[in-house]
Image (cartoon, rainbow, N blue to C red):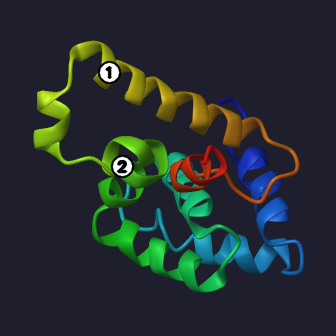
Amino acid sequence: MHDARGLILKKVSQLFPRESPESILAILDLYGIGQWETEKERVQLGILKLSEGSLEKLLHYVQTAKQDPRDVMAFAEYPNEMSVSAAEISAMPLRQAKALRKKDSDQLAAWLQDDDAKTSTGEQDAQSSN
């Protein structure tokens, strides 16, 4: 990501059109203060994705990331895979497991490139295919 802050600002505007971008960025910037809080932009994008435009969720996921950013990243980047138990994934044929990972990768890429939609999560993708 060459201009991660620009992408974060774009997502802030899409997800929180009625809020001041500065106030949302101030909340997001609570993550990344500690030296152990790594991959700031990646985690902040994950927080935004999971927030789905809700201030309550935004605050929740910032606090979650401060405790362990992997909890945010796993569900932001691999929502379909995280909806399946480790035992189920282990029992899947390799091709099926790879397809699940690719679906997550494609979904994240689409969310990152999307200029209009509030969000795109695996759960919503599953609902829209019904």
- In what element is the residue under mark 2? helix
Residue 107 is at least partly visible in this image = yes
- Identified by mark 2, the residue type is Ala
Front in this rendered view, residue 122 or 42? 122
Q: In the drawing, does residue 34 fall left or right of residue 124?
A: left
Residue 9 place in picture, x, y as percent: 78, 56
Residue 21 place in picture, x, y as percent: 82, 71
Q: Residue furthest top?
A: 95
Residue where numbered disc 2 is placed: 74
Point out which mark residue 109 bears.
none
- Identified by mark 1, the residue type is Gln
Quarter occupied by residue 92 = top left
The residue drawn where x is 81% and y is 53% is 117
Residue 71 place in picture, x, y as percent: 32, 59
Residue where numbered disc 1 is placed: 96
The residue drawn where x is 83% and y is 60% is 14
Quarter occupied by residue 127 = bottom right
Q: Around disc 2, counting alpha carbons within 10 Å, would you say few (fewer than 14), some (14 to 19), or many (20 or more)?
A: some
Q: Earlier in the sequence, mark 2 or mark 1?
A: 2
Q: How many tags in the picture?
A: 2
Q: Reply above or below: 85 against 34.
A: above
Q: CA–CA distance between discs 2 and 1?
A: 19 Å
Q: Residue furthest bottom?
A: 56
- In what element is the residue under mark 1? helix
Q: Can you tell which of label 2 and label 1 is closer to the viewer?
A: 1
